[in-house]
Image (cartoon, rainbow, N blue to C red):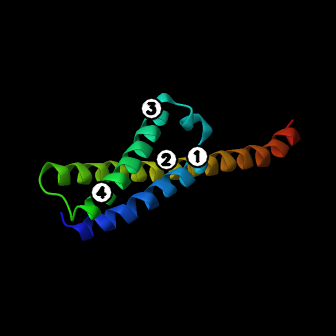
Amino acid sequence: MNAATCAILAGVFPLILIAIVADRRGIHQGLKRRSWYRRSFVGTVAACLLGIVYAVIGVQVEGFKGPEASLLWILFTVALLAFAASIVLSIATQENAEDQFETEAERTSQMPALAEAP
């Protein structure tokens, strides 16, 4: 891994971190209260912050070789997987909200018909 790759990763880690933190607002409150979500969120933020620091060090020392490079790629993979999970949870929350809205609309449209029945 050369210094250019480290520089690119040093620029991508903050974007992933900002996206995960901003996307957190769109996730259902019930999911955010679960312990697995809290632990994974803290782990993701830690991986992103450590990845930023490690990538900047990689730029300064003209890249990494061997296990050091593998560690940076592992941190990047963790950040990307967490970002993908965050997107999936956000989409699931949106789908759930739409389903609840449609169910409520069906109930309210059926109520007058039930009231008119003998």
Position of 118 relative to 58 (above/below) = above
The disc, 2 or 3, on the residue closer to the chain's N-terminal end is 3
The disc, 4 or 1, on the residue closer to the chain's N-terminal end is 4
Q: Choose mark 1 or mark 2, whichever is in front.
A: 2
The Cα–Cα distance between marks 4 and 3, rounded to whole angstroms, is: 31 Å
Q: Secondary structure at mark 4?
A: helix
The Cα–Cα distance between marks 3 and 1, rounded to whole angstroms, is: 20 Å
The disc, 1 or 2, on the residue closer to the chain's N-terminal end is 2
> What residue does disc 1 label?
96
Q: Choose mark 4 or mark 2, whichever is in front.
A: 4
Q: Which mark is residue 57?
A: 4
Say left or right for 100 vs 45.
right
The Cα–Cα distance between marks 2 and 3, rounded to whole angstroms, is: 13 Å
Say left or right for 96 vs 101.
left
Q: Choose mark 2 or mark 3, whichever is in front.
A: 3
Position of 36 relative to 59 (above/below) = above
Q: Which mark is residue 36?
A: 3
Q: Choose mark 4 or mark 3, whichever is in front.
A: 4
